[in-house]
Amino acid sequence: MALNTIDTSQSKLRNTYIAVLIPLGIAINYVGGLIAEVLSLPIYLDSIGTVIVAVIGGPWVGAISGVLYNIVSSLIGGNVLASLFGLCNLGTALIVGYLARAGKFKTVTHIVIATILVALLNAIIGTPIGLVVYGGVDGNASTNLLIAGLQATGSDLLSAAFIGRLPSQLLDKGIAVVISWLIYWRLPDNLRVLNASKSGSESAVAE
C-alpha cells in the first residue's frame, strides 16, 4: 500500500478522534467544575478535560476544547466576562500538549514540572482576569479566604490575589495532570501518536 494512501487514512482517523475529543473535553471540564462547586471543594476541577485532550490530541486541539468550555460555561452561568478564563485553559493546553509532544510527559519529574508551569501560568493569567470579572475574588471560598487573610496582613489586592491562587492552582492542576498522565499511558499506541509531530507521525506510519 502506498505511503500517501496510509497518510490519508491516518488523517481521516485523526480528524475523527479530534471530533470526539473536543466535546468530550468540554463535558469533562463541565462535570468536574460542577462537582467542585456543589461539594464546595477548595479546587476547580474544570481543566481536567483540557489537559486530557491536549495530551492526546495535541496542544491546539486541547486549547479549542478548553476555550469552548469556558465560553459555554460562562453563557450557562450568565456571566459572559467569565469566558476570559478561557485564556487560562488555552495556556494550560499549550503547555501540556507541547510537553507531551516533545516526549516530556513520561516521568514523575515531567509531571511535577508540568504542574508547576501550568499552575504558575494560571495564577499569572487568572489574577488580572479575576480582578476584572470578580473584583479580585472568584468562586473558590478557600482561595477567597486566603486572599482576605493576605490583605489583612498588608498585601495589596493584586499580590494577595496572585499568592492566594497558587495553592489551589498547584493542587488543582496537579490532579488534572496526574489523571491525564495515567490515562495517556494506558491508551493504545494508535491513540498516543495523535499528538506526535508531523515527522514523528510519518515515521510511525512508515514503520
Image (spheres, rainbow, N blue to C red):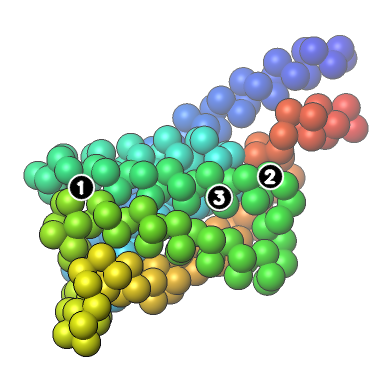
Query: What label sits on residue 101 in the rendered view?
Result: 2
- For numbered disc 2, what is the local secondary structure? helix
To which quarter of the image does residue 146 belong?
A: bottom left
Marks 1 and 2: which is nearer the front?
1
Q: In the figure, is residue 44 to the left or right of 58?
A: left
Give neighbour class at mark 2: few <14, some 14-19, many 20+ (Cα, 10 Å).
Answer: many
* Nearest to N terminus: mark 2 or mark 3: 3
Could you tell me the amino acid type at mark 2?
Answer: Arg
To which quarter of the image does residue 6 belong?
A: top right
**Residue 192: where, in percent of width, then height?**
68, 45
To which quarter of the image does residue 121 belong?
A: bottom left
Real-space Cα separation, disc 1 to disc 3, in angstroms? 22 Å
Marks 2 and 3: which is nearer the front?
3
Real-space Cα separation, disc 1 to disc 2, in angstroms? 30 Å
Q: In this view, does 175 lie above or below 199?
A: below
Mark 3, residue position: 95
Q: In the figure, is residue 4 to the left or right of 12?
A: right
Real-space Cα separation, disc 2 to disc 3, in angstroms? 10 Å
The furthest residue to the bottom: 153
Badges 1 and 2: C-beta atoms under 8 Å apart? no
Mark 1, residue position: 82
**Picture residue at 47% right of the left edge, 30% below the top:** 19
Instruction: Name the foreground residue: 40 vs 187.
Output: 40
The furthest residue to the right: 207
**Residue 144: where, in percent of width, then height?**
20, 74
